[in-house]
Image (spheres, coloured by chain):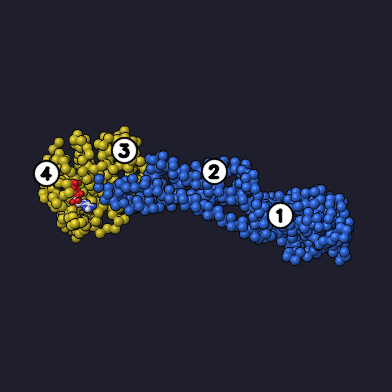
Amino acid sequence: MNDTISTPPAVRTEDLWKVYPQEPEPVEAVKSLDLIVEPGDFVAMAGPSGSGKTTVLNLLGGLTRPTRGRIWIDGEEVSDMRDRDLARLRLERIGFVFQAYNLLPVLTALENAEFTLLLRGTPAEERHRRVMDLFREMGLDGLEDRRPGRLSGGQQQRVAVARAVAGDPALVLADEPTANLDTATSAALLDVMERLNRERGTTFVFSTHDPRVMERARRLIHLVDGEIESDVRRDAGAVAP
Amino acid sequence: MSDDPVWRRIAWRNLGRHRGRTLITASALAFGYLAAVLMVGLMDGMNAELIENGTGLMVGQVQVHAADYLPERNMHRTIGGYEGIDLAGFLRRLESDPDIVAAAPRLYGGGLVSSGDQTLGGVLFGVDVRREGEVTTLLSTLREGRAPRAGAFEVAMGSEMARQLDVKVGDQVVLVAAAADGSMGNDLFTLAGVFSTGTPALDASHVLVPLPDLQYLLAMDPGRVHEVALTTTRPWDTPVIAASVERSLSAFGPPLRVRPWTELRPELAESVELMGSMNWVIIVIVFAMAIFGVANTMIIGTFERRKEFAVVRALGTTPLGVGKTVVYEGIFLGVLALAAGAVVTGPVLVWWHNRPPDLSGIVGGFAWSGSMWRPILRVEYSWDTPIVAAVALFVTSVLAAVYPAWKATRVPPADALAD
Ligand SMILES: Nc1ncnc2c1ncn2[C@@H]1O[C@H](COP(=O)(O)OP(=O)(O)OP(=O)(O)O)[C@@H](O)[C@H]1O
Ligand SMILES: [Mg+2]
């Protein structure tokens, strides 16, 4: 049904619903969401607490199943995929960045960044080269052998971003990636993400509460009560230094 | 699979994450290993005692007969038939088997023993006195006098028989027996010793006669014996040894049967077997206890890491991968515990084997299954127990990981984004 010859959208949803069966009445966390994210975009999702940001990211990443509606990632329909295939899709095409960094504490920074490549069975040499390149780009060189416990929050989150993009995913989903970071570190992380977006064309969709972070997005979606309240392109602002 | 090294690495490092906890769990398993191996060793030791006491007095561990000798015990059916054998050569041949420690030839005759106007029926038990001492303890039960000397027409008899005949050491007795040539053999013998085995049937009926003298009395050639009793290196393995001895003798000529004590004393064999099955019970109980402790620790460990499982699932791990890392953790824990267990168990086993505590002073001996049992806590080694216990330990640690692993695979990936 996709009749365009060019690359498919990184994300596309159609009448997407997520209803949590809850007492006394079910929670409609996402209501009839129609969304298209073009490859290479840099999208922020804002909205009050409980507006459905995390739920949308969960749905796009195949971490929860929609109650209704359809999702395509990189042109492939995921809404009816089996768990195994979803896992594979996440491994190969989606990167995740979490608010609480969520690096594996028993692995070094380098091993954490390599994680998805390790799972994919990428040869050691290539793994190493890719991650070392990223570390240099992101100012992480010298920290390769540190365990997360001996890294600052900002460093950990940069390692997490490296982990998310190391496998060249079609899409990186980040849930409030800067919420645990101070202003300066947030700005630095945004710099890194922006650069990866610009230089590698990695698509980012991230949620945030922070107006300073929203400013850096090229497209800003406002969610309220599980619905899109506004969807603004602000390319000019994002490109400015 | 290609991702296995990652999961192994994570599993190994996770063990290092809570060193104290890992140490305690591994120690519990190692202690379980020690306990299982020691307890089974003790049971094996008791078994060895049972066997020794039940076979040591008369039966011996293995007996060689002409194939048609038992059960009738026809006196003509000697080893090698009427011709007999080159006895010295035959014994040498038997003793050349590395599993055979000693061999003692025997000849049986039924007859009458008289002194004055007293006459009793008895079993004339012809033995090579020196060799018999290497196979059974009968001669060590001599209470008065000494062992009879060959060629001197001396005998030893049971204490009850001596009492009934009213004879003492130095007295003369007449032995009368049906000889192999159909005549009646009778000769005068001197009572050299009186034995008291504690087994009434033996003490009332057996007359110990040096082999050549009995052969002479029964008009049999020196190459004729009914039985050769053997002592082996491994009393609990006698069925195997007997079978191999029988095989090695198959080229010997006249058909022979080689029977282990398990066939000669089936009731004893049964109680030994019963104790053998206890070994399994011990191992199962010890490790069944361990499994809950280990599983409990692992459940706690995996519960603490729920978020990590959710994260790796979100990053694209299959549930199988998550389960694998937990199972690997169980495997590594098992390996650690086994190493520790082996290091501790080895020396304890050697020490206990060589210096078994003797509780005779406290408990005293008692009869069990027709034989005397000494309360010596002796520990036997065997190869299979440490291996079986090692397998059990390993299975335990892996099984203990199965439930936590399954729980880990159930962690929903969406939990990664929850705080
Ligand atoms: N697993 C769940 N079960 C039941 N209700 C849920 C679940 N997850 C989210 N919800 C509900 O769905 C709605 C949307 O939640 P969601 O976490 O997506 O909001 P959010 O925009 O991420 O909020 P925040 O800014 O606080 O992170 C909320 O009302 C929330 O209570
Ligand atoms: Mg949220």
| Chain A rendering hue | yellow
Label 1 close to label 2 by CB (< 8 Å): no
**At 26% across and 51% down in the image, what residue appears?**
B414
Q: Quadrant of the C terminus of chain B?
A: top left
* Element assignment for label 1: loop
Q: Which mark is residue B345?
A: 2
**At 17% across and 55% down in the image, what residue appears?**
A28
**At 47% across and 43% down in the image, what residue appears?**
B27
| Chain B rendering hue | blue
Q: Which mark is residue B60?
A: 1
Please report, as a chain letter, where disc 1 is located.
B
Q: Position of residue A46 (x, y in %)?
A: 15, 46
Do dots 3 and 2 share one subunit? no
Q: Can the viewer see residue B95?
A: no
Q: Residues within 10 Å of mark 3 (few under 14, many from 20)?
A: many
**For marks 1 and 2 on the same chain, the one whose residue lies earlier in the sequence:** 1
* Element assignment for label 4: loop
Please report, as a chain letter, where disc 3 is located.
A
Q: Nearer the viewer, residue B174 or A40?
A: B174
Q: Position of residue A216 (x, y in %)?
A: 15, 40
Image-based side of B209 in relation to A213, left or right: right
Q: Amino acid at mark 1?
A: Gly
Q: Amino acid at mark 4?
A: Arg
- The residue identified by callout 4 is A234
Q: Nearer the viewer, residue A72 or A109?
A: A109
- Quarter of the figure with residue B264: bottom right
Q: How many marks?
A: 4
Q: Can the viewer see residue B388?
A: yes
Q: Position of residue B184 (x, y in %)?
A: 87, 64
**At 81% across and 57% down in the image, what residue appears?**
B164
